[in-house]
Image: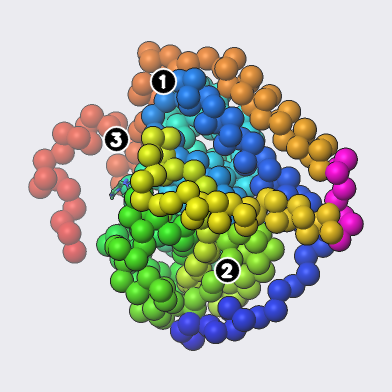
């Protein structure tokens, strides 16, 4: 297997047709509107707990997920609203989850950081920095097993998103190591927004100026894309995904991006200047794509206004639906769905009996 793939960075960008780019524009606008209304609802105390918005990073989730098949598993960290929506979760289910209502994708038990939707092969939403990476390779292992051992006949690729803060977590390195050793079909997608809470990447990460070395350490191909340009993200990820699918081997992709808002809903942002933020805001991925489509004659003012109205309507409907959805009933929901059916050797054993096992009753480690 080749190491860093210099072509991955330099290959020419393919032309994506206007219909597809218009769809991506709407997808990004939906995420933006969803989160602007999320911030508002949070300030009105309609949403509780921790909440991290993705504003500025929309092109990452939209471009990366567009390069996958609908049944390729996707997993990410807590800044997950954009990924869930880009993956096709209905905004109603996402919003009701934020509101902690039973109509949410996890019946209101997960909240903002734990959106989850098995139907769209979206496996969350994980709050422990780097914690999703071992789970991601588990998903990749499952798809490989289903294909090669159970003869399912389809090769699937897992996208495992992570932030730059996860670069220094042991869990990531254990996962990357095992991914290479077991040749797992998984792409580690680093969304490098330059900050881990208030810590700039240069302050906490070795070789921050050349992260290809992280991939090289595990013999993985490395890709890099401008995360403010959805077409560039798509083109890079399409090459990465196609290659990983064919070769059934992991890869590492760095998407250079920026978050326009604070780390979470409470962040005074003393670690960066207003000028820095506004410099990145000038490259707003939504505005950039809208401008390219307008210049090419594929979007006019009327169509853009109609698109804006349609995402506003969709999010307004999602909020209404979330507000009307009931709160969970503790007598039913406190323990419901918390523990799954026991499986394997103990499949027929009820849980309390399982818990009663003496250590000597359990099979000895090999
Ligand atoms: C293991 C662990 N350590 C610390 C934290 C506290 N924490 C929450 S978010 C965060 C920053 C992570 O930054 P990054 O991975 O770059 O993601 P971003 O917020 O930029 O999307 C930290 C340190 C945590 N959740 N888990
Ligand atoms: Mg970060």
Residue bearing the label numbered 1: 333
Q: Is residue 298 left or right of residue 31?
A: right
Q: Position of residue 181 (x, y in %)?
A: 37, 75
Please provide percent x and percent y for residue 17.
82, 62
Establish if 320 lies above or below 257.
Answer: above
**Residue beneath disc 2:** 225
Could you say which is closer to the camera, residue 64 or residue 305?
305
Mark 1 Cβ and ligand 1 under 8 Å apart: no
3 or 2: mark nearer the eye: 2
- Answer yes or no: do the residues labelled 3 and 2 have beta carbons within 8 Å? no
- Residue 288: image location, x then y, percent: 70, 56
Residue named by callout 3: 349
Q: Is residue 275 above or below residue 202?
A: above
Q: Is residue 298 magenta?
A: yes
* Image color mode: rainbow
- For the C terminus, which image quadrant? bottom left
Is residue 93 in sight in this rendering?
Answer: no
Q: Nearer the N terminus, badge 3 or badge 2?
A: 2
Please, is residue 250 above or below residue 112 in the view?
below
Disc 1 residue crowd, few under 14, some 14–19, many 20+, Cα 10 Å? some
Circle 3 Cα neighbour tier, 10 Å, few/some/many (<14 / 14–19 / ≥20): some
The residue stretch that appears in magenta:
296-303
Q: Secondary structure at mark 3?
A: loop
Q: CA distance from mark 3 to mark 2?
A: 51 Å
């Amino acid at each position: 297997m080749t190491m860093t793939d210099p072509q991955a960075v330099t290959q020419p960008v393919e032309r994506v047709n206007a219909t597809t780019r218009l769809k991506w524009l709407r997808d990004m606008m939906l995420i933006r509107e969803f989160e602007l209304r999320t911030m508002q609802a949070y300030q009105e105390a309609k949403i509780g707990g921790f909440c991290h918005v993705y504003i500025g990073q929309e092109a990452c989730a939209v471009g990366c997920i567009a390069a996958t098949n609908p049944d390729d598993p996707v997993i990410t960290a807590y800044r997950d609203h954009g990924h869930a929506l880009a993956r096709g979760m209905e905004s109603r289910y996402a919003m009701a989850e934020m509101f902690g209502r039973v109509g949410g994708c996890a019946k209101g038990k997960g909240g903002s950081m734990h959106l989850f939707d098995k139907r769209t092969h979206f496996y969350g939403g994980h709050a422990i920095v780097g914690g999703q990476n071992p789970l991601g390779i588990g998903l990749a292992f499952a798809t490989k097993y289903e294909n090669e051992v159970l003869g399912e006949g389809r090769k699937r690729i897992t996208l495992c998103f992570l932030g730059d803060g996860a670069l220094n977590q042991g869990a990531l390195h254990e996962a990357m190591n095992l991914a290479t050793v077991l040749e797992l079909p998984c792409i580690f997608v680093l969304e490098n927004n330059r900050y881990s809470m208030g810590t700039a990447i240069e302050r906490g990460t070795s070789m921050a100026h050349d992260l290809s070395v992280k991939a090289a350490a595990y013999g993985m191909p490395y890709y890099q894309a401008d995360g403010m340009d959805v077409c560039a993200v798509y083109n890079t990820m399409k090459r990465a995904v196609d290659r990983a699918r064919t070769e059934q081997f992991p890869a590492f992709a760095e998407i250079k991006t920026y978050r326009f808002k604070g780390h979470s809903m409470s962040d005074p942002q003393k670690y960066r200047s207003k000028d820095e933020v506004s410099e990145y805001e000038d490259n707003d991925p939504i505005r950039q794509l809208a401008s390219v489509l307008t210049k090419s004659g594929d979007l006019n003012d009327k169509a853009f206004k109609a698109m804006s109205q349609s995402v506003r309507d969709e999010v307004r409907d999602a909020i209404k639906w979330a507000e009307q959805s009931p709160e969970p009933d503790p007598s039913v929901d406190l323990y419901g769905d918390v523990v799954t059916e026991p499986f394997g050797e103990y499949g027929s054993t009820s849980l309390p009996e399982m818990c009663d096992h003496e250590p000597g009753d359990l099979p000895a480690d090999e």
